[in-house]
Image: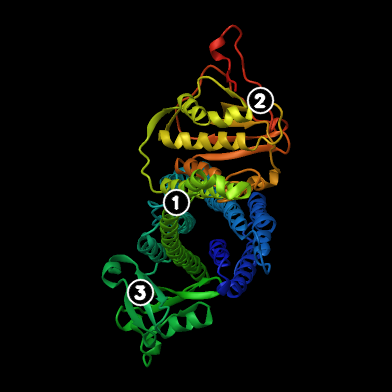
Amino acid sequence: MRVYKLALLLSQLRDPAMRQTTRAAMREEIQKWNQVLEGLQYGNARHNAIASSNPELARQLQTVKDRWELQLRPTLERALHDNPTDLHLLEQQYQHDLDDLKLDLNQMVHMLEQDAGDRIQALNRLLLMFLMLSLCIIGLTVLVLRRTLQAPLNQLVGKAERLASGDFMDVASLSREDELGRVGTALETMAHKVRHKIEELQALHSVCREVAALGHGDLDQVLHGIVDHAAAVSRADFAALLVRHPSMDCWVLDAISGAMFDAKQKEIWLTEETPFSNQAYEERAPVIVPVLSDHADTLVKIRDVYGAKSLLAVPLMAHQHCLGVLMLCSTTQTRQFTTWDVGLAEQFASYAAVTLENVRLFHELESETNALSAKLAAVEHKVAALTHEVKAPAGRVAEFASWIEQDYGSLIGEHGQRYLSWIKKEGRDLAQLAERTLDLARLTHEPLDLETVDVSEAVGEVLQLLDGAIQTRGVRITVEPDLPRLACRRIHVKQVLENLVSNAIKYMGGQSEPHVEIGTMLSNQARLIYVRDNGMGMDPAMTEHIFSPFARLAGPEISGAGIGLVIVKTVVEQYKGRVFVDTIPGKGSTFYVQLPTVAVLEEEPAVQIHPEQAGQAVPWPATTGQEALRPRQVNS
């Protein structure tokens, strides 16, 4: 779809060399997508509005259009500005909104399928009503002419009963020349027509489902199904799908109905051999040739090699350009294709065009994804190598500064010692930054060998590790008892808790009674672990940026490299979990983490988050007289 192509173009805006070309392409794609939505809603020269007779489908289409106009298109228009500063966030927002649009489109497709099914049911109901009326007429006739017409009437009744039960196959005609014979013949003709229309609807419905379920590597199977259904429904002897080669002036036989598929697939046809297919391709309109033998002076491969006597060729249209031609051929006798036949062929051709276009877009997306993955892997390798090279010299700088201070501290004076302390601090910070960067790189490559992790034990180990900072800041730590067990690696759980708790301590601000709370809760049937503090908090608008690398909310007075929350997010995403934050400036923040659990608490009820409680301590359920269920405190 074009919205996925727009996602690819949006990612290419990062390249300054391609920015102008990419913007032009994006504007063109936006205009074409707007035309597609307008065509679906109001109709165009080729088809009516798809929701003209279905209010629910009209509302769903309006939902898709509103999501495009209110969410996706404004994001793209912001990205088209001269110097967008938040291009990465715009990409994330577009991908998020694109997922919602995909759900809306899937719902619309489901409604279309349901609408088709409802029409089939309505047709059956109308048929049943007609048959019931026929039964009434037959019954009255039997009462009047029972003695002379009983046998033929019994036959007609049997026909009507079989039709009412849905049996359209075994409806034999009466061998009579009177009115009853004509009634039986009319009943038989009606049964054949109804059966044929139902088969057409079922074939279209089946092809629609196959196209919707198209997966990687299923192209040949889907195209074969399309031409088979097209030939069967249109009563053609065979159908063929010719696709124009993208670089050479020739055709590729992508599919042909029947047993010829395996032998003839991917056969090359020259344009000199296909004059009528060329005409349909160039004029973008159906071409009907009732008698191919009338063109004996023209080279026609479909006639000379495959024995076709009549031909119907319709173009495969995709976004105002033609991909190829679908041909329906009659080999047993000449045939005049009707307007109904043309409409059916165009419907099957549209399914084939959608299939080919989806496969092309999928291959483009797959190619771009592989290229980006390769580039990302190369960048990660270079960053890891560079960080490894920086780590050791940074540590030695701090170590050398300590030696100078020990050996020559009395000679360099107060200013020199201050400079040395700065050198030591910067060296240690640089070494720590390198170590955390390497930790982050290792996270994406380590195998996930799961183990059962007791979060309470992990919290205790983290608090021992951070005991110095806790004592220095005078932070009161509250830990809820009976924290859940997680199905993760123990080192990953400790990394998450250490970064969240150390951040909570670090960003206490001027809080006179600093407090950090660690606990668990249920939200939407999911077990969450939270770390809550009463520190300085942050602007809620910043919550989208804090999980980005090297993002910091404070100045140089608070040390840190801006990698801790990136590590948390990376760990959580490896386990298909989620991490988010509620915060109020000046009142504190609460970070929530969801990781896979092996057991959940049964002693307390679920605690839900309410907007007015964001950044505040949520009251915990207490059981009177049960000290084991009360939160324990670890005071500085």
Q: Looking at the rendering, which quadrant does residue 87 occupy?
A: bottom right
Circle 3 packing at 10 Å, graded few (<14), some (14-19), many (20+), is many
In the rendered image of this protein, does residue 111 appear above or below residue 242? above
- Kind of residue sitting beneath label 3: Leu
In the rendered image of this protein, does residue 461 appear above or below residue 263? above
In the rendered image of this protein, does residue 612 appear above or below residue 574? above
Left of 344 or right of it: where is 559? right
Q: Looking at the rendering, which quadrant does residue 335 occupy?
A: bottom left
- Kind of residue sitting beneath label 1: Lys
Q: Are marks 2 and 3 in contact (CB under 8 Å)?
A: no
**Sequence-wise first label, 3 or 1:** 3
Circle 2 packing at 10 Å, graded few (<14), some (14-19), many (20+), is few
Q: Nearer the viewer, residue 365 or 416?
A: 416
The residue mark sitting in front, 1 or 2, is: 1
The residue mark sitting in front, 3 or 1, is: 1
Left of 313 or right of it: where is 136? right
At x 54%, y 35%, the residue is: 593
Q: Nearer the viewer, residue 94 or 347?
A: 94
Q: Mark 1 = which residue?
A: 391
Badge 3 marks a residue whose secondary structure is strand
Circle 1 packing at 10 Å, graded few (<14), some (14-19), many (20+), is many
At x 57%, y 32%, the residue is: 469
Q: Are marks 3 and 1 in contact (CB under 8 Å)?
A: no
Q: CA distance from mark 1 to mark 2?
A: 42 Å
Q: Mark 2 = which residue?
A: 618
Badge 2 marks a residue whose secondary structure is loop
At x 53%, y 16%, the residue is: 603
Q: Mark 3 = which residue?
A: 253
How many numbered dots are placed on residues in this image?
A: 3
**Sequence-wise first label, 1 or 2:** 1
The residue mark sitting in front, 2 or 3, is: 2
- Kind of residue sitting beneath label 2: Val
